[in-house]
Amino acid sequence: MDDIMTRLSSLDEDYRMMQEMVIINDGTVFSKGVIGSEDRQKILTELRLRTDKLFTDDLLKKMDTIEGRTKIKEIIEEEVRDITRDFPNTVAGAVEEIIEEEYKNVTGFGLVQELLDREGIEEFWINGTDIWYSPSGTEEKFKWEKSFSSKKEVYRLIDRVLAPLGKRANEVNTIVDAWLPDRTRVTINMDPTAIYGPAVAFRKHPKLRLTFDDLVRNSTVLPKTKELILKAIEARFNTAFTGGTKTGKTTVMNAAICLCPPKLRYIVVEDRHELELPRDFFAVYFITRDPGPDGRGWITYRMLVKNALSISPDSIIMGEARDEAFADIVDACNTGHDLTFFTLHTGDYLGDDAAEGEGTVTRMLALMDRAKIPENAARRLVSSGIQLDIHVKRFKGRGRKVSRISGIFGMRGDNVWVEDIIRYDPGSDREIVVPTGAGMMAKLLKKRHVEPPEWMGGGSH
């Protein structure tokens, strides 16, 4: 009887200790193979202190290779097993879960991987430790129920994004553009530039690249617009793809590029890798590089464009014209480099006494001014080097559309002569031909020995 009572007392004591352990460690029950959140966090904290020293820059740059991922998995497994060496075998399964979760966290993108994988989310943002997202097709923003436990977790994610690209974000280099392997855009603003902690914007790249036929089917490109773009490519016009943020400029340009002759030598210049020419195209890709910690090693847009020109491309594709490098693109357009494409951020021209394409010309001249090109020379270079402006806009209830196409027809007096050729009317959901611009474009196509579409002759509808 005494022996039984002693055993019962011992069980009571074990039960009491287990209760305390569950309370103290927020769920750890070794006998049930469960590791609670407190113990789990302690393991992860110790693990990350170790792996921060073991994951070298060279290893992180190999993260997307089999060799790199295998080595990362080995390091995580070895360190977790060392940290939990005194844990009983009953939690072996839970330890394996921690190893697998951390491996996915390091080689994937941790907490935000769920948003990257989720259909129907176009953009999301990290603001400090909070996460906000925007469903596709809406401008509404929603705060996600999940958030980072600390800014340090966000810094780890930023390092994960930048390490394979050889980039860094710190208190000196606070603003960094980057991209993920699937070409999701990432823009990073570090503190102290971002006052309340790191601000990171993710803009997801479509899983399936839309072809030109796709854009025609979904009515982004309407019939007359389609005809004109095909004729412009045949005539090898230098073309600006313009519009505001998130309107689909790059998508339309990428689709149009795929209609170009495959046997030319294309040079693609970008600050983040988004464009992808068909596999049978001869294409060389150049990309900008941020300065290193010592401030050296900076490769700018302008340096890349000048280098591209030195190797005699047949066509230059510029991801986005937004600084003085645009002057070099315009110069190339005037020195025999036909079929040059670029995107350009522009708003809608709000005047009612001129072509809507005036807004694009104003933006172009502003970029030329940044390169200190005299105004009169800038106007003449733009007027003779660029032939077409394809403007893309998002319409409420109508989706994205090529909202107008404007032609640049040289100089008229002291000004660049621009005329709209086609405008999209959202009220009637149809294309409106502008007679003056259409007639002039017909003449320009004929000068390039390209037969204009029938609707263009005389500007009839």
Image (cartoon, rainbow, N blue to C red):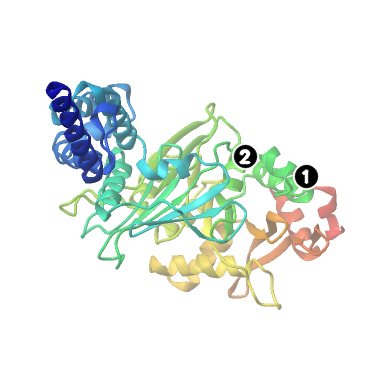
Q: Taking the image as drawn, is residue 5 in sight?
A: yes
Q: In the image, is residue 117 above or below residue 187?
A: above
User: Which residue sits at x=58%, y=54%?
Assistant: 241
User: What residue does disc 2 label?
Assistant: 210
Return the residue nearer the eye: 51 or 396: 51
Secondary element at tag 2? loop
Amino acid type at circle 1 is Glu
User: What residue does disc 1 label?
Assistant: 451
Q: x and y percent of residue 445 in the render?
A: 72, 50
User: Which residue sits at x=13%, y=21%?
Assistant: 3
Q: Is residue 373 left or right of residue 362?
A: left
Amino acid type at circle 2 is Leu
Q: x and y percent of residue 288 in the render?
A: 34, 47
Q: Taking the image as drawn, is residue 310 in sight?
A: no
Number of other residues with Cα within 10 Å of mark 1, as a class: few under 14, some 14 to 19, many 20 or more: some
Pick the quarter of the image with the N terminus.
top left
Pick the quarter of the image with the C terminus.
bottom right
Q: Who comes first in sequence, dot 1 or dot 2? A: 2
Q: In the image, is residue 264 above or below residue 272?
A: above
Q: Is residue 343 left or right of residue 453?
A: left
The answer to whether marks 1 and 2 mark residues whose Cβ atoms lie closer than 8 Å is: no
